[in-house]
Amino acid sequence: MPVFLNSTDPDFEAAFTTLLNAKREDSPDVDAIVADIIADVRARGDAAVLELTAKFDRLDLTTDRLRIMDAEIEAEAAKVTPDVRAALELAADRIKAYHAKQLPEDQQWTDDAGATLGWRWTPVSAAGLYVPGGLASYPSSVLMNAIPAKVAGVGRLAITVPTPDGILNPAVLLAAKLSGVDEIYRIGGAQAIAALAYGTNTIAPVDKITGPGNAFVAAAKRRVFGKVGIDMIAGPSEILVIADADNDPDWIALDLLSQAEHDESAQSLLITTDAAFGKAVAQAVDKRLETLERRAIAGASWRDFGAVITVPDLDVAAALSDRIAPEHLELCVADPNALSEKITHAGAIFLGQWTPEAIGDYIGGPNHVLPTARSARFSSGLSVMDFVKRTTLAQMTPDALRAIGPGAEALATSESLEAHGLSVTARLQALNR
Amino acid sequence: MPVFLNSTDPDFEAAFTTLLNAKREDSPDVDAIVADIIADVRARGDAAVLELTAKFDRLDLTTDRLRIMDAEIEAEAAKVTPDVRAALELAADRIKAYHAKQLPEDQQWTDDAGATLGWRWTPVSAAGLYVPGGLASYPSSVLMNAIPAKVAGVGRLAITVPTPDGILNPAVLLAAKLSGVDEIYRIGGAQAIAALAYGTNTIAPVDKITGPGNAFVAAAKRRVFGKVGIDMIAGPSEILVIADADNDPDWIALDLLSQAEHDESAQSLLITTDAAFGKAVAQAVDKRLETLERRAIAGASWRDFGAVITVPDLDVAAALSDRIAPEHLELCVADPNALSEKITHAGAIFLGQWTPEAIGDYIGGPNHVLPTARSARFSSGLSVMDFVKRTTLAQMTPDALRAIGPGAEALATSESLEAHGLSVTARLQALNR
């Protein structure tokens, strides 16, 4: 049974805090193992990668088979059914169109002092994308990670995807092809992250690594952070639906279950202005759980981490939502745009009852890599911005230096950084000669 | 003696690679100590903070004195000399004006399928800024960290600054006041980071922590990353000057020394098209080192990590610069804008001989918190963007769902995520009834 709460109950605050702080993930401490793997790959390169792949993926490779070459990609991609291919193509087009609007603009201007200032954006030269293998190997995640990189202008985009027992995922390879991925390697785990970060004879190093992964991958990304850039370390997925009584309980139940079926640690929350509606949704969840393929996973998630919270009005709902800072937020209310304006912290908002969160997972256009575990308080979903960086620009004229140079001299002196001041002084003296 | 290299020498590549890979920083492994401090602050809150402050800063406080109150700030700030106050005010105004142009815009549009898409930016609610104490307590860093946060719209901005033996830095307090900082606490080290991340009875937790610090502070930021957002972990400062022979060697020498004087681990590099000019700069450095106040530090940095590289032309200079991906890049050449166009990886570019890097440190307008240790390949300097986050928006109409919903169903099925597909199917069925 999920938790049923009412925001007007005297013990609500304690129960809600418990819900917020519930630890939903067992993070096994794999850091020592990962440190060894990274050191091994740095020291022995391809040889270490091959050995670790044989050990963890039961796959004996040679260096010339680390990379999946075009002919093999084509042959596998041809196995994808026409409807899935069409869906991937539509999704790729829509994701491209959305992310193209994120490209930031350069700026340059000259101010009153005569200083020309500005900045310029440039793409990361080379990026690596980790794609999980096995069951959680999702073609949609390939699109969501690879397309922003390519839209940003990343010149070289490499994917690593483990293929346990040598089994390839045709849809993943097709998604990579549709996204313009340049290289695909059949390796995974911490060894893949190490190879991307430090390079081997076969795999050139990249500058940035993104993509989801298990505890080993997450620990490896943390360790190589600084040597390369990384995206966020994602936690279990979560959804908050805010719904009034004017909804079909079954639709809302399915929306809740579409998070719950990801992972036993996923969290599905409903905030409603109508307690009876909340009960009806919970009943609809139970009914769907009778037949759902992934009912064991979805049922455990709903039982352990689900909650139905009744509130007196939507203002209270918005306030609670901001404390949750949900990854996915569905607003199934009469005026979703008005409610949306009251929300400050959320990874993605789905407005109205015709926008199930699954649309956003696949085909809406916005990215599905979103901040989890309340990190929407301070971070954003994956975007083109993750694959560009800004260089600031400044150019003084003699007049500009005359105008603002003395200020720099005064501050340098106050910070006891003499050479800083002298570098301005020497130029000002030349101007006054 | 710094290294003298010539890009046309046969052994250049090896020597340049050695230069690139030189480990410039001893990172003492303080992680275990920091883990204990964070656990202690989480468990005992203010009591732990007070004890650790007594131990490390030789300062006995009570909870009511943790925060530096307005009267004390005013009294200290009044001690700042008029020229330094005027310089801080000018710098604050210019930094505000520059960063105001970074505020990102919301977007919303409706596409051909009838889907309304977009995103919205909102500020981080509460941010904490770590300011080092003692010698490296720089008012300019307060401006550079605090102003972007306030321009972004951060509601609550708290500073922690250790005050060993109780000694306050008037210019730091004035800079905080000018930047609109809301709270200042006289604590430092890992205990300050822990207090900001987890909160105590006296200090409310924040969502994001930025600012420079020593190895303990850096390790603590790494540890609380995820609970809160952090900025980059900064390494020692570095400058690359690309100069032709048409420059005053003394000016270039002072620019190199203004990085070298920061830290024995700082790195100052010169790339020049004229070997004789390179020698003249090195001589000018030696001459300035005879009298410079911080000659011990600057001399060690120049000796251990400095280099003068001669190249045949500016194209080679640009290519080497991109491999260095310098934090600060000065282009002292006849057409700095043309050369700038050839540069892809740099934190900040200073164009022309009238733009010494010290202008950027203090008063130019762009931020001086910049990516070090080659991380300009994948990251940017501090900006307003570090204090905002994006919420993506999507709203389907029935027609839009009819148009793209089947694609989502196909992909959900291919990923074996049944509830995802059913959440779309249930709605499409209702539309077809």
Image (cartoon, coloured by chain):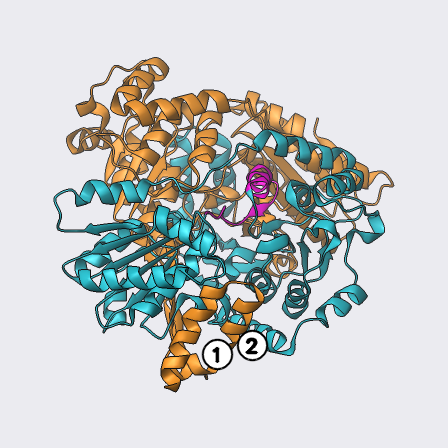
Chain colours: A cyan, B orange
Q: Nearer the viewer, residue A38 or B203?
A: A38
Image location (x, y in percent) of residue B130: 37, 34
Left or right of B60 in this view: B134? right
Measured along the vertical axis of the image, is residue B63 above or below residue A298? above
User: What subunit carries mark 2?
Assistant: A
Residue at left offset 32%, top offset 73%: A353
Is residue B120 visible from the viewing direction of this image? Answer: no
Mark 2, secondary structure of its residue: helix
Image location (x, y in percent) of residue B371: 53, 44
Q: Amino acid at mark 1?
A: Ile
Q: Which residue is mark 2?
A: A90
Crowding near pointer 1: few (<14 within 10 Å), some, many (20+)? many
Left or right of B218 in this view: B396? left
Q: Nearer the viewer, residue B135 or B276?
A: B135
Residue at left offset 48%, top offset 29%: B219
Q: Which residue is mark 1?
A: B404
Q: Nearer the viewer, residue A250 or A209?
A: A250
Residue at left offset 75%, top offset 65%: A73
**Marks 1 and 2 close (CB-CB < 8 Å):** yes
Q: Which residues are magenta?
A: A215-235
- Residue A427 covered by magenta stretch: no
Q: CA distance from mark 1 to mark 2?
A: 8 Å
